[in-house]
Image (tube, grey):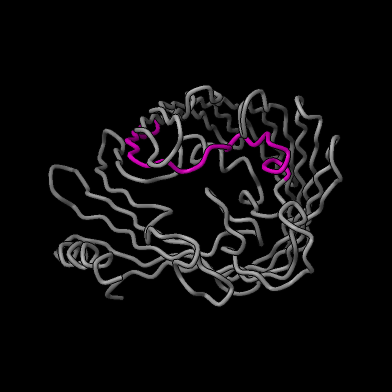
Amino acid sequence: MIKKLLPLAILLGAMGTAHAELAVYGLVDISYGKNENIDNKSARLHSGGDDAYVGGATQGNSTTRVGLKGNMDIGSGLKANFKLETGGIDRDLRIGKENKAFFHRQAWAGLSGGFGEVRFGRQDAVAFQMMGAYDFNGQANAASALGNSGVAPWGRGRQTQSLQYISPNMNGVTAHVGFAGKEDGETNAKAATSAGLTYAAGKFSVSVVGETERTTGGENFSAVAGSYDFGVVKVMAGYADGFYGTNWKGPSVGFVAPVAGFNVGMHYGKNNETNNDATEFFINREIYKNTYAYFDYGNLDRQAAPSNKAYALGVIYVFDVPFGR
């Protein structure tokens, strides 16, 4: 652990100069429920990092995490930025149980300015960053209809050796492109390129994204999604091709509405290749400052296997604390 934290100590020392901003951030998700897509064990308490698999977690709504982020003015209108984030936190809030790498969720550094932003390191895929806002329940771990059916427009996980560029907003248009080297330890791994565009104007937003295959014989990924906020209800529609593997594709729809101080919503995804469909219902509310209560329920209706359900009743606490304040 000391060897893992030494580079961090050096970085924190460097960030201690003038015009630097540094913060510790994260969230804690504690829930009660079960996910039959993973097993049929009895419902129990979970943290957002329970029952983790390669690329994600499968219980609760969000993944419990903690991280450090910062930026520093280096002159000529440029800022140096970084983010280091770990998960794998079990329901006893122990860190690193499921993962050998400490900062396995995010570990990148970059520059930003009038030209936009450049990042390099381990980070979320272009598709995940661009399309995440079209999932009104934050890509829920257990109940996600879009993820469980395999048609999520955000359906690409984190990448290592990832170089990404995010453009500034140009009259409502934002571009995001990326290149990632071969994933360490992956059989038949290939370098992958990705690109996407978002147009947002007032209450309307639409995005399109694509990524080349990550493994030899794998599947290219493409997705489009849009949303419109009517005030009394916000709606989305999307279409994705290649989320889990060869020819996994289909549409998705959803809505969220404010009702008596709560956010109430639903998502539905239909896989055109497997004929599986999934439904997700959710309700949440901020009960204290930065503290949210939620209930998620999802059902995956399989054509060639028994249907499964997942549910979680929980609380999420979000924190973002600047150093020196």
- The reply to whether residue 170 is visible in this rendering is no
Is 98 a magenta residue?
A: no
127 vs 152, left or right, is left
For the point 83% across and 39% down, which residue is it? 302
Is 159 a magenta residue?
A: yes
For the N terminus, the image quarter is bottom left
Q: Nearer the viewer, residue 98 or 105?
A: 98
Rendering quarter of residue 15: bottom left
Give percent across and percent down for residue 100: 40, 60
Q: Nearer the viewer, residue 200 or 299?
A: 299
Give percent across and percent down for residue 265: 76, 50
225 vs 100, left or right, is right
For the point 84% across and 41% down, which residue is it? 305
- The reply to whether residue 225 is visible in this rendering is yes
For the point 50% across and 29% down, which residue is it? 198
230 vs 64, left or right, is right
Q: Which residues are magenta?
A: 145-169
For the point 57% across and 53% down, which residue is it? 53
Give percent across and percent down for residue 9: 21, 68
Rendering quarter of residue 96: bottom left
**Figure label count:** 0
Rendering quarter of residue 275: top right
